[in-house]
Image (cartoon, rainbow, N blue to C red):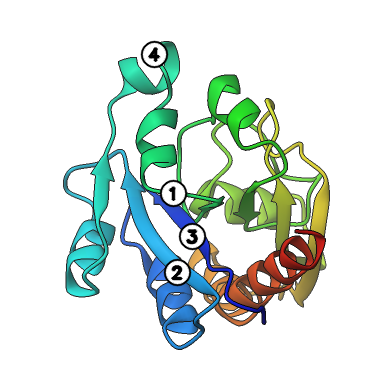
Amino acid sequence: MNTGTTIRIAVFASGAGTNAANIIQYFSNKPSVTIALIVCNNSKAGVLKIAADNHIPSLLIEKEKFFRGDAYVPELQNAGIDFIVLAGFLWKIPSTLINAYRDKIINIHPALLPKFGGKGMYGDFVHNAVLSAQEKESGITIHFVDEFYDNGKIIFQTTCPVYENDTAGSLAQRIHALEYEYFPKVIEELIEKKLKSI
């Protein structure tokens, strides 16, 4: 992908970490990208075990410092982080962190933004809203992160059908399949563009 430049990524996650695990696996044999840090706001989250199993340092963060302090920017900079990926991270990103990593933070959302986004719209809350609206399709949106929930510039979207007999769980399975297939590839394409512009 590049001549000797390694992009160091921090993955932010709050839960089981299935997307984080998939991203770690995808980049495990790509020398130009290193998953250098897992950042988590939940001491019981499964993603911390995934980090340990893959010998990746983790940073457990707390609300006060994140929202009203320095947003852990010094820790990220000390770790040499170039790029931030939100993979099931449930806190809003504060402006201090956005300003430090402007256009270098991306998120994945389990619906087709601008529909079904905003505060509290994650996981089954999103899928149930899609089903209640009797949508014929759903999908994923990968977007840059700005100061507002699910608002930043859209990078990539792809769709899947919604069936009449779907539950939140059955729809979630198809959404997860899209996330696993496309999220690492879109990250890689974004980083290739960044490296070409260096």
Side of 11 relative to 44 (left or right): right
Answer yes or no: is residue 65 visible.
yes
Q: Badges 3 and 1: C-beta atoms under 8 Å apart?
A: yes
Q: Badges 3 and 4: C-beta atoms under 8 Å apart?
A: no
Side of 108 relative to 194 (left or right): left
Q: Earlier in the sequence, mark 4 or mark 2?
A: 2
Query: Which of labels 4 and 2 is toward the front?
Result: 2
Name the residue type under label 3: Arg
Q: Kindly report the distance in space between the C-alpha atoms of the residues bearing marks 4 and 2.
A: 27 Å
Rendered position, 87 above or below 31: above
Q: Badges 4 and 2: C-beta atoms under 8 Å apart?
A: no
- The residue carrying mark 3 is 8
Task: Give residue 63's position: percent from left, percent from top.
Answer: 33, 22
The image quadrant that residue 177 belongs to is: bottom right
Label disc, if present, on residue 80 of the rendered structure: 1
The image quadrant that residue 158 belongs to is: bottom right
Q: Kindly report the distance in space between the C-alpha atoms of the residues bearing marks 3 and 4.
A: 24 Å
Rendered position, 75 above or below 29: above
Name the residue type under label 2: Thr
- The residue carrying mark 4 is 69
Which residue occupies the foreground of this view, 86 or 173? 86
Label disc, if present, on residue 139 of the rendered structure: none
Name the residue type under label 4: Gly
Q: Badges 2 and 3: C-beta atoms under 8 Å apart?
A: yes
Residue at position x 47%, y 53% in the image: 88
Residue at position x 41%, y 74% in the image: 24
Label disc, if present, on residue 34 of the rendered structure: 2
Rendered position, 179 above or below 69: below
Q: Earlier in the sequence, mark 3 or mark 4?
A: 3
Which residue occupies the foreground of this view, 157 or 80? 80
